[in-house]
Amino acid sequence: MMKLFRFLLLLMAVLAGAVPASAEKRIALTFDDVPRGPGTLMTTQERTDRLIAALRQAGVSQAAFFVNPGHLEQEWGRDGAAHIDAYVAAGHVIANHSYSHGWLRSTDTAAYVADIDRATAWLQGRPGYRPWYRFPYLDEGGEDVAKRDAVHAQLKSMPTAFSYGDGRPGKRDRRELRRLKGD
């Protein structure tokens, strides 16, 4: 884990010096699956403290932490709300990563959307909350374009205003065009 923190610090230092301050380009630094369980090298509290310190040391004023409120029901997650609050107190923002972190490709669409709603209910009104959604596992339904489109339509109608998943809309769109053409 320390190697990961050192790598992140080095990467952020390199990137910070590589682009002039006046440049328009930006990087969004995000963390999924918050709160995280304990690792073999550190407790959940140590992870939170070290991550906040590493971000501060690297000059990162704001990162986004994508939250799974269902983790709070785990034995290791019982103090997770305090860790989430610590990220926000350090200037970072929180967003929706679903309640239970399920795969869209293996979940009924209505159940999947209800899971997003459940996480949104926990997040709304909390300091630092942004109405963003990141698909767990970056899974937008695999080859099931109809399921993906149904969830996207639901997301557009919800307080969760921004969604993204596997980051490959060009690939998906080309695949859908081939399907429509019968290729």
Image (tube, rainbow, N blue to C red):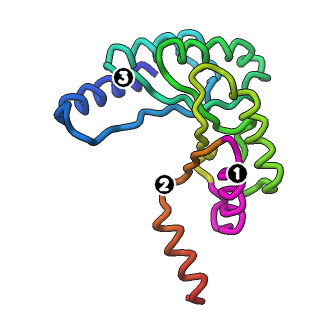
Task: Tell me the residue that label 3 is attached to.
Answer: 60
**In the image, 71: left or right of 138?**
right
Q: Secondary structure at mark 3?
A: loop
Q: Position of residue 171 (x, y in %)?
A: 48, 68
Which residue: 65% across, 11% down? Answer: 82
- Front label number (3 vs 1): 1
How far is mark 3 from mark 1, CA to CA? 32 Å
Q: Position of residue 158 (x, y in %)?
A: 70, 46
Q: Callout 2, which amino acid? A: Gly
Classify the position of the C terminus by image quarter.
Answer: bottom right
The 10 Å Cα crowd at callout 1, few under 14, some 14 to 19, many 20 or more, is few
| Contact between labelled residues 3 and 2, with CB atoms less than 8 Å apart | no
Task: Tell me the residue that label 1 is attached to.
Answer: 157
Q: Callout 1, which amino acid? A: Ser
How far is mark 2 from mark 3, CA to CA? 23 Å
Q: Secondary structure at mark 1?
A: helix
Q: Is residue 20 above or below residue 40?
A: below
Q: Is residue 41 visible?
A: no
